[in-house]
Amino acid sequence: MSAAARDIGIGQPAVSERIERLEAHLGTRLLRRNTRRMSLTDSGALFYERSKVAISAADLALAVVDERVALKGLIRIAAPYGAGEEVLMPALLKLRAKHPELNIELVLNDRVVDPVTEGVDISFRLGDPGEGDFVAHPLGDVRRVLAASPDYLVRNGTPASPDELIHHAFARVSGLFNDSRLPLISLNNQIVSARLNVVFSANHWRPLYTMLRAGEAIGVLQYPVCRQALESGQLVALLPEYTVPSFNAFLLYPPIAKASREVSACVAFLKEALAETLRETNV
């Protein structure tokens, strides 16, 4: 209560009175109070989380329309390999074109980076974003494709079913398919777990891409990084009646109360630009 009063420049009794008025308006208790501590009720926790989303949306809307002042300074953005290079970079080019005085530092790694605790302003992430003192805004999906080169298929044959994958050399990105199994979704939404013969691992997608292009293995790539190779015939999608589960994509950023105007404006811009890029690259 005291900290809230200091933040908004009023006395603590006024904060208590406003909370009591809010509870009366809502017709429910938001806080449990006793002489030693205070905690949220279930209704209070729900109201707090939903209110943060509403306030965040309103602040971001203001940041979008307020284009009279150019964005300046340094923005640090974390992103994964692959999607960071092929999905985020087009959006960052548009952001720089719109705000040429903005300096951007891009940090690529495949960890989930908390923008509040790990020294970045914004984080673009794939998969489960986890929990933390940040907002995780869903952007869409990043498709993945099981692929091989035509040369590999000529020499080793084309797998006709998930059961046949075990007979083929498989290359992977480190940390994925650690149990040597590949989940696949059939046309009738059944999950199949295919056994793999893993012969190569790398902590970056590009060596894996090189292995597949060279005809040395089959593997799973994010669609944005292999789209051109698939369209040109340099790679071929395997088992077309099955799909590899997509990655969910999120934009992670601090609560608006902790974010600068520049961060809020960049978040608003990237939400729209990344969602558009994901729609285009997943076609």
Image (cartoon, helix red, strand yellow):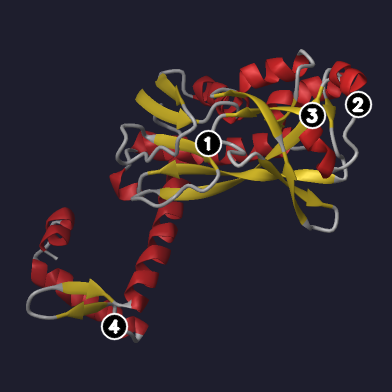
Q: For residue 114, what is the image quadrant?
A: top left
Decide: is 195 above or below 89.
Answer: below
Crowding near the residue tagged with mark 2, few <14, some 14–19, many ≥20 C-alpha atoms within 10 Å: few
If you read the primary sequence from the N terminus, does the residue marked by circle 3 or circle 1 appear first?
3
Label 3 vs label 1: CA separation?
40 Å
If you read the primary sequence from the N terminus, does the residue marked by circle 2 or circle 1 appear first?
2
Nearest the camera: 54 or 82? 82
If you read the primary sequence from the N terminus, does the residue marked by circle 1 or circle 4 appear first?
4
User: Which quadrant, please, contains the C terminus?
Assistant: top right
Q: Would you name the residue on which mark 2 appears?
A: 157
Label 4 amino acid?
A: Arg
If you read the primary sequence from the N terminus, does the residue marked by circle 3 or circle 2 appear first?
2
Q: How many marks?
A: 4
Q: Residue at x 73, y 24 (%)?
A: 226
Instruction: Determine whether label 3 and label 2 are within 8 Å by CB.
Output: no
User: Which quadrant, please, contains the N terminus?
Assistant: bottom left
Q: Residue at x 55, y 30 (%)?
A: 174
If you read the primary sequence from the N terminus, does the residue marked by circle 2 or circle 4 appear first?
4
Crowding near the residue tagged with mark 3, few <14, some 14–19, many ≥20 C-alpha atoms within 10 Å: many
Q: Residue at x 35, y 66 (%)?
A: 48
Residue 65 is at least partly visible in this image: no
Q: Would you name the residue on which mark 1 appears?
A: 270
- Which-is-in-front pick, marks 4 and 3? 3
- Which-is-in-front pick, marks 2 and 4? 2
